[in-house]
Amino acid sequence: MTDSPSWRMATRLVHAGISRSPHQETSEALYLTSGYAYESAEQADARFAGTNAGFIYGRYGNPTVSMFEARLAALEGAQACYATASGMSAIAAAVLAPLKSGDRIVAPRALFGSCLWILDTLCPRYGINVELIDGADLTSWREACTRPVQLALVETPANPMLDAVDLAAVRAILPAEALLVADNAFASPVTQNPLQFGADIVVYSATKHIDGQGRTLGGAILGQRALLDQLFKDYLRHTGPALSPFNAWVLLKGLETIQLRVEAQARSAAHLADALARHPKILRVLYPGRADHPHFAIHARQMRDGGTLLAFEVRNGRAGAWALLNALKLVLISNNLGDAKSLATHPETTTHRRLTPEARAALGIHPGVVRLSVGLEDRADLEEDLLQALEAV
Ligand SMILES: *Cc1c(COP(=O)(O)O)cnc(C)c1O
């Protein structure tokens, strides 16, 4: 069966990209194989020459991985997708494959920790220059772009304070030949599609909402077919961050339910954000869907809803945040996110401990800040748990 262009999104999420074996299985087949046999020496020759379509080796491709790539591309509205073993292998490829020594990257300071390490520690070792700026300040972008720039890596909403980057405005400021790479893990492809706002490349940690059930690592790079093939085909084949077929199968099944999950989680997140904002022990709540988020206007243009994540600051700094975390009975303490289970983390002492206190303060990551990833539990149970835990603050 081939995908129909008239299918609406919910249908695509269940059927897009399926390629059935002669057994006509209803569920997607899991092809656990590293190699493929050829019918003849002539066919092997043609396969390597590119004149005979088909798989060559597990590092180059796999039918289950291809199904996942096709379905995620359908959801993102992208021509092409390359799956990778983790979000970080996708981001490392997206940053390193297009660049060479002497090139320059501009990126917001508010970035996922490992992304920041690639930019501030790894890239300089290879002679790639990096300038970190305030991603929400278009004047900083204009100033940074007065010198040559080949790539911008942005995250919107960003970890952990849910800062926004105005993708269309940044695209307009960047030189035409510079690549705009958007890490869309926090929003998920259900809530935001950065290609629509001028991003050239979208990268995912599929570990998060795409799996959505806390089981496997995975990643993806999406964009136009010609651009992706030119930048990444050889790089990915020869450096080998291939997604395992088993993990691709788990992620493919995750896509069947992603819209239902993420929309329900976002409704609960909006409800909890409002409930927390009214609480006297909470100094502030940061939720992209609330009008009091400093970047609400940008989020409202780019996101279909407020998303599944929020951050809030409790009274009494680190002691208050730890007292809250330790008093939770339902919400788990975990730095993961996008899971069916609600997860809370203390950025100062976990995800952002590598930053200096000054750098954390500049990003608003005060010691009392807690990040909450809202899961699929009944929202009344979550609200009760958070309110009882706040009594310990
Ligand atoms: C989790 C995450 C990553 C890294 O993805 P992995 O799958 O853990 O390698 C990158 N960026 C963001 C925003 C993330 O949340």
Image (tube, rainbow, N blue to C red):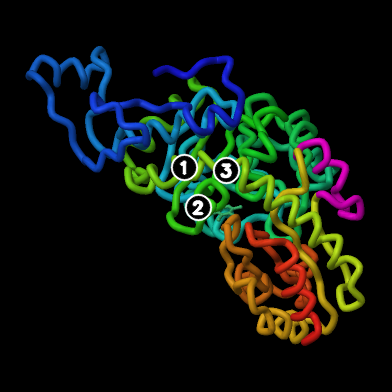
Give percent across and percent down for residue 79.
53, 23
Q: Looking at the picture, does residue 166 appear above or below residue 164?
A: above
- CA gap, disc 1 and disc 2: 17 Å
Asked if the magenta segment contains residue 60, the reply would be no
- CA gap, disc 2 and disc 3: 12 Å
Most foreground residue, 184 or 142: 184
The amino acid at mark 3 is Ile
The disc, 3 or 1, on the residue closer to the chain's N-terminal end is 1
The disc, 1 or 2, on the residue closer to the chain's N-terminal end is 1
Q: Nearer the viewer, mark 3 or mark 1?
A: 3
Where does the C terminus fall, quadrant-wise? bottom right
**Circle 1 residue:** 93
Give percent across and percent down for residue 181.
61, 38
Q: Quadrant of residue 343?
A: bottom right
Q: Residue at x 77, y 52 (%)?
A: 163
**Circle 3 residue:** 258
Give percent across and percent down for residue 156.
71, 46
Q: Start and end of the magenta stretch?
A: 289-303
Judge: label 2 CB < 8 Å from ligand 1: yes
Most foreground residue, 101 or 29: 29
Q: Residue at x 24, y 28 (%)?
A: 23
Give percent across and percent down for residue 211.
50, 49
Q: Quadrant of residue 45?
A: top left
Kindly indicate whether the residue at mark 2 contacts the one at mark 1 (C-beta within 8 angstroms).
no
Asked if the magenta segment contains residue 300, the reply would be yes
Residue 16 lies left or right of residue 340; in this view the side is left
**SS for dot 1:** helix
View extreme (left): residue: 41
